Image (cartoon, grey):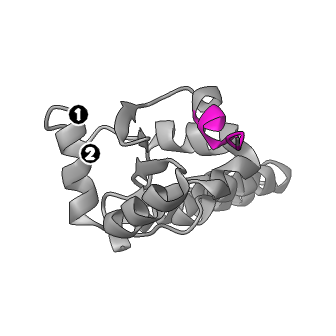
Amino acid sequence: MMRAWVLPMLLVVCGVLVATALALRGLPAAALPLLLLFVLLAGLYSPLAFPRSIGALEARRRSALDGRPIVYRRAGCQYCLRLRIRLGRDARRLYWVDIWRDPAAAEAVRAANDGNETVPTVVAAGRPHTDPDPAWVRERLAPRPRG
């Protein structure tokens, strides 16, 4: 859990240091926007930017029931963040699993990616897809016609 917060905390500390240095040099107007930028980046790279993570076994169980894809991710991954941002509100309809919190999830990702922990790995209909296009993921969320 703590490992997921290292990058965001580092960004905030760096932002405070840079903003303080600018303020001490008589540039407070430049210090505040820069500090806000660092805080924004910290928020984007924090676990707070993603829907609540669940365990791999629970995600598989839920996905089997309703067919929604599972997204294996880790904190600080720029590709996971890109997928999350481009999915927008639809991201909450997916099952997000943090591979740093769940050893079974990390093992599932390694099995799908030749031993590598490459994320995001999206499992849809039981098949893994590494770093898929967000439009493709969104299509997997579309309601299936009943007939």
* Residue found at x 24% / y 50%: 108
Query: As rendered, which of 43 and 14 lies closer to the eye?
Result: 43
Q: Is residue 113 left or right of residue 33?
A: left
* Residue found at x 46% / y 51%: 70
Tag 1 residue: 113
Q: Is residue 96 above or below residue 138?
A: below
Coordinates of residue 16 in the picture (x, y in percent): 61, 63
Task: Return the residue found at the far front.
Answer: 147
Q: Is residue 1 left or right of residue 36?
A: left
Q: Work out whether residue 103 can be spotted.
A: yes
Please, what is the three-letter code of the amino acid marked with disc 1? Answer: Asn
Q: Is residue 88 magenta?
A: no
Coordinates of residue 138 in the picture (x, y in percent): 65, 36
Q: Is residue 43 left or right of residue 89?
A: left
Coordinates of residue 144 in the picture (x, y in percent): 67, 41
Secondary structure, mark 2, is helix
Magenta segment: 137-146
Disc 2 from disc 1: Cα separation: 6 Å
* Residue found at x 40% / y 65%: 61
Quarter the C terminus occupies: top right
Please, what is the three-letter code of the amino acid marked with disc 2? Answer: Val
Coordinates of residue 127 in the picture (x, y in percent): 35, 36
Q: Is residue 139 magenta?
A: yes
